Amino acid sequence: MLNKQLYIFIIFVTIFFNKSYSQEENTNLKIKDTIFEAYTFNPLSPAKAAFYSAILPGLGQAYNKKYWKIPFVYGALGSGVYFYDLNNKNFNRARTAYKLRLNDKPDEFDGLDGKIYLSDDALTRAQKSYKKDRDLSLLVTIGLYFLQIIEASTNAHLLQHNVDDNLSFSPQIIQNSVTNKSVVGASINFNF
């Protein structure tokens, strides 16, 4: 029993209190990891991309070096502004014509001199319809503005992740050996 305790004590002392030294200490030793590549990233990059997109639409996409997205941003925002302006002009035309008609003055929809005739009820409905479409265009434009900010921030966040060929998703059609029918399946492969 004493010998067993002595052996355990010697092993304990050897493992925890033994300091081994080699010939010289090499301070220039650098170890390179063969599995993971060292990648430094800026944790504030998504916030910076969102800030740039909020200042000038498309600037966050340029910061992320996704220049091909900038025409889509301006196309979407430009379409929203165009439809807002178009509906606002039509609303103002219908409103002006309705006000002139209430004051018994000629308007562009009175039917005289080859002009289109619209009744008072039609002018009222046109005003409501154009106002609703104008407000909807404004909401869509604001939504697209915020969407491009969120897209720039999300893209900057996703650029920090390791996405390479070693991680893949491949859908496959598999032949069932029992029933001899095709089965659709998917597999996720991790290659090391």
Image: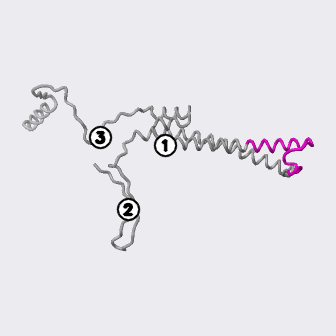
For disc 2, the neighbor class at 10 Å (few under 14, some 14 to 19, many from 20) is few
Which residue in the protein does label 3 denote? 36
Q: Secondary structure at mark 2?
A: strand
Magenta range: 88-114
Give the mark nearer the N terminus: 2 vs 3: 3
**Left or right, residue 88 beside residue 171:** right
Give the mark nearer the N terminus: 2 vs 1: 1
For disc 1, the neighbor class at 10 Å (few under 14, some 14 to 19, many from 20) is few
Please name whichever residue, 20 or 12, is drawn nearer the observer in this view of the structure: 20
- Identified by mark 1, the residue type is Trp
How many numbered marks have been drawn onto this rendered protein structure?
3
Which residue in the protein does label 1 denote? 68
For disc 3, the neighbor class at 10 Å (few under 14, some 14 to 19, many from 20) is few
Give the mark nearer the N terminus: 3 vs 1: 3
Give the x, y percent position of residue 17: 15, 28
Please name whichever residue, 57 or 48, is drawn nearer the observer in this view of the structure: 57
In the rendered structure, are the residues bearing label 3 and label 1 in contact, judged by CB atoms less than 8 Å apart?
Answer: no
Q: State the CA–CA distance, disc 2 to disc 3.
A: 29 Å
- The quadrant in which residue 103 appears is top right
Please name whichever residue, 34 or 64, is drawn nearer the observer in this view of the structure: 64
**Left or right, residue 138 beside residue 114:** left
